[in-house]
Amino acid sequence: MEENKQKCRRFSTHSSSRFSHVNNLDDGCLMHIFSFLSPIPVPWLKNYDQENRYNTALVCHRWLFLACHPRLWLRVDRAVKRLTEPGVFPSIEEAVSAARPGDTILIGAGGFHFASNIQINKPLCLIGGGELPDDTTLLCSRGSDSALEFRSTCKLAKLTVKAELGCCLLHRSGRLIIEDCNLQCESNPLDYLSYAIITTAGGCEPLPLSTAKRNGDSVSVSQTRIKGGAKAVLTSGTLALQQVRVIYAPTSILFWFDVVHRL
């Protein structure tokens, strides 16, 4: 018993010393190291549940500040006409094209950002720059299939997405996380053709439990307003709507639900 206690003390002292050496690095050096980490857990990467900026930010207040620093993000600013400032783009499509897997894109608040059939085939995090989802609006042109099309693991937060005669979000594959957003299908006589979310992931045949877990295709929605359209979610693959929760607020209805494999 005493021997085990001594081993624990030595391990604790060694870990503390190692952390102290890393924490002696200046802010610029630490931020450069953090820039190589994924901001969100990506299931197919080794140690994805540990080596990401989210867990890094939990270490201490200093690391939280550095891991969330705007310099680590790409930004979308409609006022920018030319690519004169590194990491700042005039449109969402250009920012997505320039982004590396795991990057976070901060979309500037105010006005409308046009988004039509933008394909995202790498892990990204798209966040609205305002305090509320209504502060940052993505507008899908009439007749487009979707505002955003997802073919990889991605996360959306604090965004309003509006679409007419199409869908707000088209999910093809990967894990899609939607937090604190507004999805709105504009009123139209052909409203039955509009959906907030369409997912075609998973093919047509039900998968065995082990295969479904490895596959990872899913949609997770939390604290999100959904308005208009024929349905909140249309599925054409093996995914199905599950675990639906609704809160009726004075001015809106908030949804929580998952779209996962039918087993």
Image: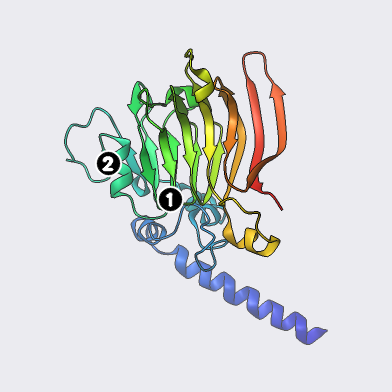
Determine the residue positioned at 46% across, 67% down.
Answer: 22
Q: Splitting the image into 4 quarters, where does residue 70 fall?
A: top left
Coordinates of residue 50 in the picture (x, y in percent): 56, 62
The percent position of residue 175, horizontal first and vertical second, equals 54, 50
Give the side of residue 155 with respect to residue 210, left or right.
Answer: left
Q: Earlier in the sequence, mark 2 or mark 1?
A: 1
> Could you say which disc has been placed on residue 198 in the image?
none
Other residues around mark 1 within 10 Å, as few (<14) / some (14–19) / many (≥20): many
Q: Is residue 142 visible?
A: yes
- Disc 1 target residue: 66
Could you say which is closer to the camera, residue 61 or residue 97? 97
Q: Residue at image x 25%, y 34%?
A: 90
Q: Which residue is mark 2?
A: 94
In the rendered structure, the answer to whether residue 105 lies left or right of residue 239 reads left
For residue 161, above or below residue 189? below
Taking depth in this image into account, of 233 and 91 the one nearest to the observer is 233
Q: Residue at x 36, y 36 (%)?
A: 117
Quadrant in which the N terminus is drawn: bottom right
- The foreground one among 132 and 148 is 148
